[in-house]
Image (spheres, grey):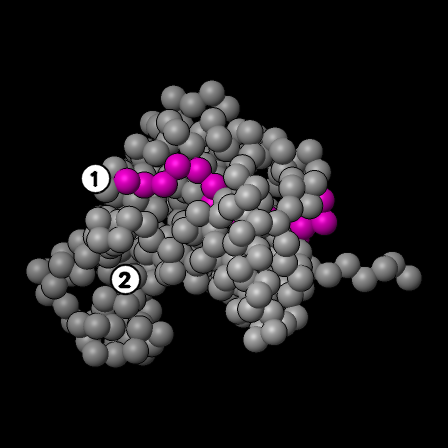
Amino acid sequence: MAPFKPNRVVVIGTGAVGTTTAYTLLLRKRMPELVLIDVNHQKALGEALDMNHGMPFVGGVKLWAGTYEDCREADIIIVTAGASQKPGETRIDLLRKNISIFKDIIQKITKYNQHAILLIATNPVDILAYATLKISGFDRRRVIGSGTVLDSARFRYLIGKHKEIDPRSIHGQIIGEHGDSELPVWSLANVAGIDLGFDEAERKEIFEDTKNAAYEIIDAKGSTSYAIALALDRIVASILNNEGSVLNVSTLLNNYNGVSDVFLGAPCVVDRSGVREVLDLPLSEEEQSLFQQSADKLKSEITKLEL
């Protein structure tokens, strides 16, 4: 009989996103083992120690600051490391800074682990997830970007706010790039199967507020952290619990609405295998065109990289 192996999640990067994600996973007891890794090992040690002091209130999780060797037994490795987005800076602007960092990180991970699911959160997330796939050589199902899971949550929140309806009851999604070329799927948005009834001005306002949410938060407090941590926690739960939940993660597309060889956010069935399936969306002609434009934008950036 094979020895029992507890689920292990590794978070690489202990900045605002990494630490908030780790804390969220800890509070929700998603796994028995949680490892923090950072180029600044002292920072990781401090974060781990601070969280461990709360174990008498939570319990059930073994948490420590580790090294890349601790990736060996990991089931999920979440990468949040890299330069963070500054006020006035786009996610694409971050690409030059973060691609070299990523090459080093992914090579260190794969030295010890070739079986985990790699969950990428660093921006520009779609391009860096694509780079991770190429650098790692992993099966496409096991490289996942956080995609438009958070964007879709923002979209549903804002619709719910306008309608004074619990956002959990809103069916709406953002697809495409996690960034400026993302698009709302208004043709399918509804509550209880009923059209939302927004006019064009209301739709424009809601989408602009969705798209620019991160910029607003970064201008106000320097970084986003809480909602992306909850989004990553949701993805981790679907994987570890083998849920088969439909989440708008970023995955490598193959002739999806005419788009191939690029990572974009789309509704995916997520389970223990990673991305089990990408669900076809019946897009309107306008949505189809915008989705293609989003793909073309990212492809133009990818061609500039040496992968």
- 261 is higher (above) or lower (below) than 288: above
* Local SS, label 2: helix
The answer to whether residue 9 is seen in the rendering is: no
Instruction: Tell us which disc is closer to us: 1 or 2.
Output: 1
The residue singled out by tag 1 in the image is: 88
- 171 is higher (above) or lower (below) than 227: below
Q: Quadrant of residue 198?
A: bottom left
Q: What amino acid type should be assigned to the residue bearing mark 2?
A: Phe
Tell me, yes or no, whether the highlighted magenta stretch contains residue 24. no
Q: What amino acid type should be assigned to the residue bearing mark 1?
A: Gly
Q: Where is residue 203 in the image (x, y as percent from the top left)?
A: 15, 61
Which residue lies at the image location 47% right of the left edge and 41% below the top edge? 81
The residue singled out by tag 2 in the image is: 155
- Closer to the camera, 89 or 299? 89
Q: How crowded is mark 1: few (under 14 residues within 10 Å), some or many (20 or more)?
A: few
Contact between marks 1 and 2 (CB within 8 A): the answer is no
Q: Where is residue 150 in the image (x, y as percent from the top left)?
A: 36, 57
- Closer to the camera, 117 or 10? 10
Query: Start and end of the magenta stretch?
Result: 71-86
